[in-house]
Image (cartoon, helix red, strand yellow):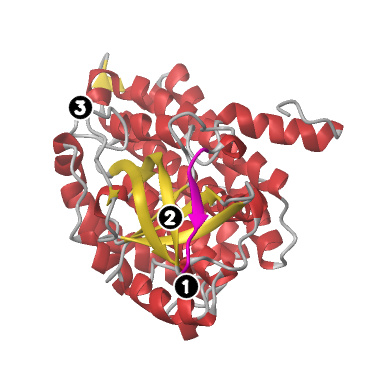
Amino acid sequence: MQSTMTSPRNKADATEPTTDFYCLDDLLTDEHKLVRSAVRNFVKREILPIVEDYAQRAEFPRQLVPKFGQIGAFGPNIPTEYGGGGLDQISYGLMTQELERGDSGCRSCVSVQSSLVMYPIWAFGTEEQKQKYLPRLATGELLGCYGLTEPNHGSNPGGMETNFIERSDYYLLNGSKLWITNAPIADIAIVWAKNDQGKVRALIVERGFEGFTTPEIRNKWSLRASTTGELVFQDVRVPKENLLPGAYGLKSALKCLDQARYGISWGALGAAMDCYEVARRYALERVQFEKPIASFQLVQKKLAEMLTDITQAQLLCWRLGVLKNEDRATTAQISLAKRNNVEMALRIAREARQILGAMGISGEYPIMRHLMNLESVSTYEGTHDIHLLILGAEITGISAYK
C-alpha cells in the first residue's frame, strides 16, 4: 500500500532554513530554543544590516558592545551573582552559533570577553577581583582582551618572553603580545607572563597604566569587522592585587583556551549554516539554461554534502555540550570539534562560493566575508595542525611537538 504521509520538510517554502535535518531541536530544552531565538533575532536586527559596510571599511561596530551585554551574551555561563547569565554550556554554544551566522568578528568579541576574560577572573580570581570586574564586563561597560600569543611564540606559548619582576608593592611588567582581539579598545587585559622564577602567571592590566599601549593591526584581509592589535608593556607597574592567585602555569592559560575553542566549534557551525542557506536559496532562484541551477546534479551534490557535513557537526557540538555540562569534556575532545567544524565550515563556504559563481565574491552576499573570516578562525585558539597534534598525542600517548 502506498503511503499517503507527506514529510513537512517537503512542504517547506524554499526560503525556510533546512539545516535541522535530524530534528536536533528535539534534543534542546525550551530555554535553549529561547536563547537561540533571542540571539538570532538580535543578529538580524543589529548585525546583518551593518556588518557588510563595517567589513568593507575594516572597522569594528563598537556600538554593539553594550548591546551584547543587554542580551546576556557576555558571560552567559558565569554565575548570576557576578552578573552572568547562569546558563548551561549548550546555551552558550547556541549563542556563539547565532552570532557567527552574523559575523565571525562579532562572535570573536563575545568569545574573548566571555571565555578568555570573564572566565579566568571567575575561575582564578579573588572574590574582590570578581566583584570589581565581572559585573561591569557582563554589561559591556568594560571590554577585555587576552594576552597570550607573542610575536615570536604563537603555537609555543611556553617560550613566552613577556615577564614581570616583583617590587615592594607592585610588579614590573615588560614584553609584548600580538594578534590580540579587542586589544585596541579593551579596558583590561588578562596577560600571561613569567615571574622571577620563570613560572607563568596571569595579571589584570588596566588601560591607563603607564607604559601600556595597544597599537592596532591594520590591512587585514580577514576578520575585517573585528579589531585586532598588540599589547606592549614597557616597565608597566601592575598592583599586586591584580595578580590572579589561582592561575599557575600554562595549564591555567590552556584551560581558558578550552572554553574559547568550545565556543568556536559552535560558531563555525553557524557560519557554515549561513553559507549553506544562502547557496540553497540562490540555487533555487538562479535560472540558467531555462531552469534553476538547483536542478543540476553537480549543484545538488554540493548542497547534499553541505547538509551532511552540517548535520554531523551539529551532533558533534550537541554531544560536546552535554559533556561540558557534565564537566567531562577533555581538551582533546574540544580540539577535535574545533578542528573538524572549522575545516567543515571552510569547505562549505568554498562550495557555496562556487554555487553563487561571480556573485560569490560580492558584498551583496556574505559568502566571501565568511570564507575570509574562517581563514583566521582556522588559525586562532590553536591552528588546524596543532589541534591535529593534540589529537595525535591523545591517540598515541606521544607528543609530537615537545
Query: Quarter of the image containing the C terminus?
Result: top right
Which range of residues does the magenta coloring cover? Answer: 161-168
Give the SS element for disc 3.
loop
Please identify, in this view, whether the residue under mark 1 or under mark 3 is nearer the observer: 1
* Residue placed most toward the observer, 90 or 400: 400
Closer to the N terminus: mark 1 or mark 3? Answer: 1
Residue under pointer 2: 172
Measured as percent of width and height from the top left, residue 137 is found at 36, 70
Read off the residue under disc 3.
Answer: 362
SS under mark 1: helix
Of callouts 2 and 1, which one flags the residue occurring earlier in the amino acid sequence?
A: 2
The residue at the point 71 percent across, 43 percent down is 332
Q: Position of residue 98 (x, y in %)?
A: 40, 55
Q: Is residue 103 visible?
A: no
Q: Establish if 251 lies above or below 203.
A: above
Place of residue 390 in the rendered image (x, y in percent of width and height, measured from the top left) = 70, 35
Which circle, 2 or 1, is nearer the viewer? 2
**Residue position marked by numbered label 1 in the rendering:** 241
Q: Residues within 10 Å of mark 2 (few under 14, many from 20)?
A: some
Q: Nearer the viewer, residue 173 or 4?
A: 173
The furthest residue to the right: 397
Residue with the most extreme top position: 289
